[in-house]
Amino acid sequence: MAPTDETHNLLILSRDFHTYHQILSQAMLPGLSIFAHEDVERALRIGTDYDLLFGEPSLVSKVIRHLPKLRWVQSTWAGVEPLLSPDLRRDYILTNARNVYGSLMSEYVFGYLLSIERRILDRWALQQQMVWDDTPSNTLRGKLIGLLGVGTIGACLAKTAHHFGMRVHGYTRRSETCPHIDRYYHPGELREFATGLDYLVCTLPGTPKTSLLIDEKFLSYLPQTAWLVNVGRGSVVDESALVAALSQGRLAGAILDVFLDEPLPSDHPLWQTPNTIITAHTAATNYPPDIARIFIENYKRLVRSEPLLYQVDFKEQY
């Protein structure tokens, strides 16, 4: 990267601030001064002269009002909902974390799909009873998976699905660039998309347009034998409608990693809903070196006056 006379002050706000500070310091980015912490109040006491922010949206949202020189925010998350509140400023470039979660999401999704087809949990339970279970397993081969959202994560899931010999349908607003999608569907074609699916996997972001998209009507389009997997955002699913569909046997099961309220309240009916597997938003956790690489690349682009990667459209909210 060519030398630059321009200087920038970066504030890192993250529970992993030590790790991020170390990685960025070792990168020796020209013209960059770094302060890092997880305590918002302490960061602001040090000063408000930061023009760059790098961190968790839940923390970043608490300081952006106080930084008059703010120019760019790099989120450590894919989701940036805390920064999209209408009462927060939008006069800066916001970029998020992308192209780092696909392989982890594939491990999560297909780990559970294989456990269903291979009856792993059922066989384990029978083993505890010393029961010899030689009934045949099922297979993913030939099954139809529908990807609700075909961004970078959906594209990675599609590739893995093809590896297992699955048929892959994708629902997207506009993108048709993934070579592993056998057929695309677009807005207005939800019924056609859902019909015949063995698995529906949702990777959609949380936006006004995706809110409660998986509602009672959408669930009615799915076969009774279908499983829902949600690794996108909890706001996409009408949880009451999902509980009803599962309880009444209108859906085979659900694997849920995200919820409208997190942590999921202990009295939420999903905890007691049949054929429901709940995980605590752990499908794809942040790996700081991967996230730091995004900031480093974008910083190099910034000083070269080039467009930054993974910019969030405040209007579209992703």
Image: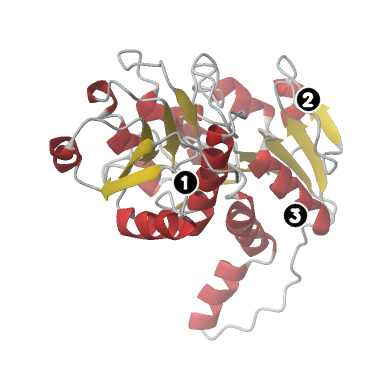
Secondary structure beneath dot 2 equals strand
User: Is 163 on the left-hand or right-hand side of 54?
Assistant: right
Count numbered badges in the picture.
3
> Front-most of 5 and 67?
5
> Front-most of 85 and 14?
14
Secondary structure beneath dot 1 equals loop
Gap between marks 2 and 3 measured at Cα: 20 Å
Q: Position of residue 61 (x, y in %)?
A: 30, 29
Q: Residue at x 42, y 32 (%)?
A: 73
What's the residue type where badge 2 is placed?
Tyr
Q: Taking 235 as reference, is 14 above or below it?
A: below
* First in residue order: circle 2 vs circle 3: 3
Q: Position of residue 151 (x, y in %)?
A: 67, 36
Q: In front of the other: label 1 or label 2?
A: 1
- Report the disc number at residue 185: 2
Residue 275 seen in this snapshot: no
- Report the disc number at residue 160: 3
Q: Taking 170 as reference, is 138 above or below it?
A: below
Residue 175 seen in this snapshot: yes
Gap between marks 1 and 2 measured at Cα: 46 Å
The residue labelled by disc 1 is 30
Q: Residue at x 47, y 33 (%)?
A: 244
For mark 2, does the 10 Å Cα neighbourhood hold few (<14), some (14 to 19), or many (20 or more) residues? many
Q: Quadrant of the C terminus?
A: top right
- Mark 1–mark 2 CB contact (< 8 Å): no
Quarter where residue 221 is shown: top right
User: Is 134 on the left-hand or right-hand side of 245?
Assistant: right
